[in-house]
Amino acid sequence: LSHEEFCDYWLNNHGKLGQRISPYIRMHRYVQNHRRDMQINKVFQEERNAPEPFDGVAEAWWDSWEELEGIMNDPDAQKAFQEAVEDEMNFIDLERSPIWLGEEHVIIEDGKPVPY
């Protein structure tokens, strides 16, 4: 897919799927960050000799690690996750797309440093 086709499918198809399945997987928040083809992105990429950029990055939040782990034994959640992965195969090169769990550390909030 072209970058534009990817973004359109991701937002308008997969985004709606995410809204529909979120109650089953108890997802608190889901954000799609679509790459913008701007000159400043090209400058950053050249300065760092960076690899080809991703089309976008998705972020998903759950209320706790325990809740996320708990849904792994829920058949309805498993069915919803499977539906999401099957849809992802329509627009994502899964073998080249990293996926990982992380913990957020806020460093600056509302333009001000946050103690950590």
Image: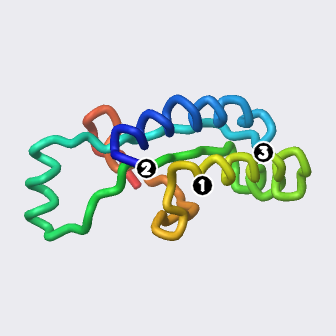
Question: Which comes sooner in the sequence, label 2 or label 3?
Answer: 2
CA–CA distance in space, label 2 to label 1: 16 Å
Q: How many marks?
A: 3
Q: Residues within 10 Å of mark 3 (few under 14, many from 20)?
A: many
Q: Residues within 10 Å of mark 1 (few under 14, many from 20)?
A: few
Disc 2 element: strand
Judging depth in this view, the residue of 73 and 86 nearest the camera is: 86
Residue 99 disc label: none
Q: Amino acid at mark 1?
A: Met
Question: Which comes sooner in the sequence, label 1 or label 3?
Answer: 3
Q: Amino acid at mark 2?
A: Val
The residue that mark 1 highlights is 89
Above or below, 20 against 114 in this view is above
Q: Amino acid at mark 3?
A: Ala
Which quadrant of the figure has residue 39?
top left
Camera-side mark, 1 or 3: 1
Disc 3 element: helix
Image quadrant occupied by the C terminus: bottom left
Which quadrant of the figure has residue 35?
top left
Judging depth in this view, the residue of 113 and 93 nearest the camera is: 93
- Say which residue appears at 34% left-offset and 50% top-offset: 107
- Say which residue appears at 20% left-offset and 67% top-offset: 50
Residue 57 at x, y = what percent?
A: 43, 50
The residue that mark 3 highlights is 80
CA–CA distance in space, label 2 to label 3: 20 Å
CA–CA distance in space, label 1 to label 3: 15 Å
Question: Which comes sooner in the sequence, label 2 or label 1?
Answer: 2
The residue that mark 2 highlights is 57
Disc 1 element: loop
